[in-house]
Every structure is written in structure tokens, then in C-alpha cells.
Image (tube, rainbow, N blue to C red):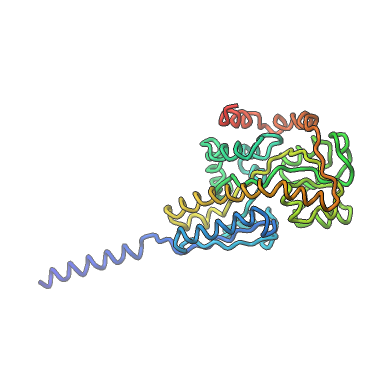
């Protein structure tokens, strides 16, 4: 009897040891930041993402949202995530192309005609493979890449009808090669700058122009410091929700799937708001006294045609065409 009890005790001890030694996924908090205002569609999408994730994971994954650059500009948030912080952000995919060059195709000029095209490509096996490569090379996990912020237009102090009108114009853009070369090809002098500094730079004359999507123009009140908005739609700003891989790996596989599925769903929700609010934003800009005009985009398309070859993106462009069947 004593021997039996001893064996039972040993078994219990072994099982207890295994239980304590087994990997456990504790509650994880992801701090998601954005440079945009809370009322921006991206901000509203993130709030939905927070509520849905916390409900679906029963609080095992908590989301904290920080608007208006509270965690820094986009580059700073990406650096924090890569350094191991439990931080994430919504970023233009071109910023990630320094790790996986092919990702730049998502921000290439005149690449997508509609959000639906971009959404379809963002969920294709070809694109998702680049996302897997991103985690390996950068320490960033791409949760979804279908957060549409709208078509980028030109914001200037003088009328623009053709690329030649941008000669010598210092234009703020995002500091990634695809953006810089696109703006340069369109005729302006690309000037990378943090989004939070754009208003004052335009106001003080440190910048002559910027380019932005309709909801960001109103969100940042840039209509107060520019005179013209020219609707070129030269880039369809499709962005990605990314988080640090180190924080991501603390989440159970079951909850990871929930979070990724909800990131796609919330991206579509935010994108729907972007599309719905875009025309209203431009109407509000026009009502403020700023000239809002259409333009023949053919000369601009011709001007940027060489950017694909310059940045070795012709194969990626062909992949987009293949996925979209065009």
C-alpha cells in the first residue's frame, strides 16, 4: 500500500511539474498608435478593433488606442515595435519596403483603381508571403493590409494643371523611396517630414505643398494653410496594421487567428468610412474657401511611369495584374 501511495505521489509531482513547465499565454496588451485624429476613419476602425478583439478573446488580448501621435510619429512607433515594445500602428506599406522591397508595390503610383482591387490583392497568397517575410526580417507582424485611407491629392499654394506646374515646389511626402520618387517624377521636390509637423511647416512657409487623402486634410485642418487641392489620386493610400513580433508571439495561436481575422474585418469597416466620408471632406474643404479641382491625370501617369523600373518593381506590378486578372 505504501509503495502504491509513493508511486501516486511521484506521478502527481511529475504532472504538477509538467503543468508548471508548460508554456502559458498570459493576458497580452497591444498599444496601437496612429498619427491621425480620433474622428478619422482609421481611428474609428481601431476603436472597433479594440472592442471586438477584447470581446472575442474574452479579455485575454487587450488593446489600447493612442491617437494624434501620442506614441510618436509612425517611424518612431515602428522602431518601438521592432525593439520589443508591445506597440503597433497603422502604416503606409512603403515604410516596410526597406525590409521587404516588394511591399512597396502597394504604394506605387496609379497601381490600384479602387479599394476593392487593393483589398483583393492584400489577401492574395503572393502578398501574404511577403508579410511572412516581413516578420522574419524586421520583427514586425502584419495583421492586415487593407486599411484604406483614400486617394492622395496635391495640396498647394498655386494652381496645378500639369507636372510642370510643380517645378521647384517643396512638397511634404512620406520618407520611403516609392513616395519620394513618385513626387519627384511628378515635378516637385520631395520633402519627407513627420505628419504632425506639416501644418506648421505650411503655415510658416517651410513647405510649399503637401499631398494627402481627403479625410486627413480635414482631420489635420490643412485647408487652413493651403489654397488649392488638385485631385490627382496619384497614390491610393492602402495601409497596414502592424505590431511587434515579440508581443505577438505572446498570444496563443487561437487568439492570433481571432485578432488577424478581426484586423481584416476592422480594416474593411474603416475603409468603408473612408470612402463614405471622402466626398464630404472635400466638400467641407471647398466650403472653407479652398479651390478643389479635377485635373487630367494622363500627364501625371506618364510622368511617373518610369518609377516602377527605377525601383525594380516591374515584376511586382505584373503580380498585381495577375492576381486581379487584368
Question: Height in image: 119 above or below 207?
Answer: above
| Viewer-proximal residue among 111 and 27 | 111
Image quadrant where one finds the C terminus: top right
Q: Is residue 248 left or right of residue 215?
A: left
Callout count: 0
Q: Is residue 181 left or right of residue 249?
A: right
- Residue at image position (59%, 44%) is 146
Q: Is residue 82 left or right of residue 73?
A: left
- Residue at image position (42%, 53%) is 254
- Residue at image position (73%, 41%) is 179
Question: Height in image: 55 above or below 146?
Answer: below
Q: Position of residue 68 (x, y in %)?
A: 70, 60
Q: Position of residue 219 (x, y in %)?
A: 73, 55
Q: Quadrant of residue 299?
A: top right
In the current view of this chain or complex, which residue is farthest to the top? 326
Q: Is residue 103 left or right of residue 189?
A: left
Q: Position of residue 262 (x, y in %)?
A: 51, 51
In the current view of this chain or complex, which residue is farthest to the bottom? 2
Q: Quadrant of residue 177?
A: top right
Q: Position of residue 101 (x, y in %)?
A: 63, 38
Image quadrant where one finds the N terminus: bottom left
Amino acid at each position: 500500500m505504501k509503495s502504491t501511495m509513493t508511486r501516486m505521489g511521484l506521478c502527481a509531482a511529475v504532472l504538477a511539474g509538467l503543468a508548471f513547465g508548460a508554456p502559458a499565454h498570459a493576458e497580452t496588451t497591444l498599444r496601437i498608435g496612429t498619427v491621425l485624429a480620433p474622428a478619422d476613419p482609421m481611428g474609428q476602425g481601431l476603436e472597433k478593433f479594440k472592442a471586438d478583439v477584447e470581446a472575442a478573446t474574452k479579455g485575454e488580448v487587450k488593446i489600447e488606442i493612442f491617437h494624434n501621435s501620442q506614441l510618436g510619429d509612425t517611424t518612431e512607433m515602428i522602431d518601438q515595435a521592432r525593439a520589443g515594445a508591445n506597440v503597433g500602428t497603422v502604416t503606409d506599406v512603403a515604410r516596410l519596403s526597406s525590409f521587404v522591397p516588394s511591399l512597396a508595390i502597394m504604394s506605387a503610383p496609379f497601381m490600384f483603381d479602387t479599394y476593392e482591387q487593393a483589398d483583393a490583392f492584400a489577401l492574395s497568397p503572393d502578398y501574404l508571403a511577403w508579410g511572412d517575410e516581413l516578420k522574419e526580417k524586421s520583427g514586425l507582424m502584419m495583421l492586415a493590409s487593407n486599411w484604406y485611407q483614400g486617394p492622395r491629392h496635391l495640396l498647394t499654394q498655386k494652381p496645378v494643371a500639369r507636372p510642370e506646374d510643380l517645378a521647384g515646389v517643396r512638397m511634404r511626402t512620406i520618407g520611403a523611396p516609392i513616395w519620394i520618387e513618385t513626387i519627384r517624377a511628378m515635378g516637385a521636390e520631395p520633402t519627407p517630414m513627420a505628419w504632425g509637423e506639416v501644418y506648421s511647416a505650411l503655415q510658416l512657409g517651410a513647405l510649399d505643398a503637401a499631398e494627402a487623402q481627403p479625410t486627413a486634410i480635414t482631420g489635420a485642418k490643412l485647408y487652413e494653410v493651403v489654397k488649392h487641392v488638385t485631385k490627382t489620386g496619384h497614390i491610393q493610400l492602402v495601409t497596414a496594421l502592424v505590431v511587434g513580433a515579440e508581443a505577438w508571439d505572446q498570444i496563443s495561436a487561437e487568439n492570433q487567428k481571432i485578432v488577424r481575422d478581426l484586423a481584416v474585418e476592422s480594416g474593411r469597416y474603416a475603409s468603408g468610412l473612408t470612402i463614405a466620408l471622402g466626398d464630404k471632406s472635400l466638400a467641407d474643404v471647398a466650403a472653407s474657401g479652398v479651390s478643389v479641382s479635377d485635373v487630367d491625370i494622363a500627364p501625371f501617369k506618364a510622368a511617373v511611369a518610369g518609377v516602377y523600373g527605377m525601383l525594380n518593381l516591374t515584376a511586382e506590378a505584373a503580380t498585381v495584374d495577375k492576381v486581379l486578372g487584368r
